[in-house]
Amino acid sequence: AFVRFAAVITLGLSTCFAANAQSILKDHDTYQPLDISAERLEMQQKQGRAIFSGAVQVTQGKLVLRSDTITVFYKLESGEKDPAISRLDAQGKFSLTSETETLTGDWGIYDVDKQLITVGGDVRFDQGGSELKGTRLEFDLVSGLAKLDGKSAAGEDGRVRGSFAVPSKNDTKPKDGT
């Protein structure tokens, strides 16, 4: 039987993370171009997808996704020259990095239309010296809200885990020296 626990962390507002560690992913502009590089590309135009494999890297502004394989789902509207990308599905050694955080897992989904990133498997979220661990994380790029779940499996207690950086005493003193 699976026991499910969930933790909700508002990035940048949570007292668990350092005050200066606001996520750069909040309000990320998903309409920026997606630059994709890989060792191999397989186009499946009738199905509206492109499969990139081999050390895949996707860059969009300050957001960088890496994985073994990424499937890009798109639509080509009549009269349009460029396809409209709706979703990216990543399999194998997934990572997302920005200037303020690193997110890793076994798989990831970047839903461009919904402005939502979902990561699953052995999930780790690092930000400002703090680390969270779980099995599934959803990150809303509009609000900056992250939801981390833990599920029990054989030999695991199914809990979300966190290790948090605590500011030094010098960081908590008022700036006027009192």
Image (spheres, rainbow, N blue to C red):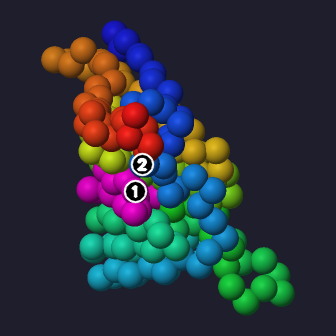
The residue to which callout 1 is attached is 100
Name which residue type carries label 2: Ala
Q: In the structure shown, which secondary structural element does the residue marked by tag 2 occupy?
A: loop
Q: Is residue 129 left or right of residue 48?
A: left
Contact (CB < 8 A) between labels 1 and 2? yes
Is 26 drawn above or below residue 39 in the view shown?
A: above
Q: Quadrant of residue 68?
A: bottom left
Magenta stretch, overall SS: strand
Is 44 drawn above or below residue 91 in the view shown?
A: below
Q: Which of these two is toward me, 55 or 27? A: 27
Determine the residue positioned at 43% across, 72% down: 58
Count neighbours of disc 1 (C-alpha within 10 A) and say few if under 14, some if 14 to 19, many if 20 or more: some
| Residue 97 is inside the magenta segment | yes
The residue to which callout 2 is attached is 21
Residue numbers of the magenta segment: 89-105
Determine the residue positioned at 73% across, 89% down: 81
**Residue 80 position within the rendered picture, expressed as x and y whole percent measured from the top left:** 78, 85
On residue 71, the disc is none
Q: Mark 1, mark 2: which one is toward the viewer? A: 2
User: Distance from label 1 to label 2 (Cα)?
Assistant: 6 Å
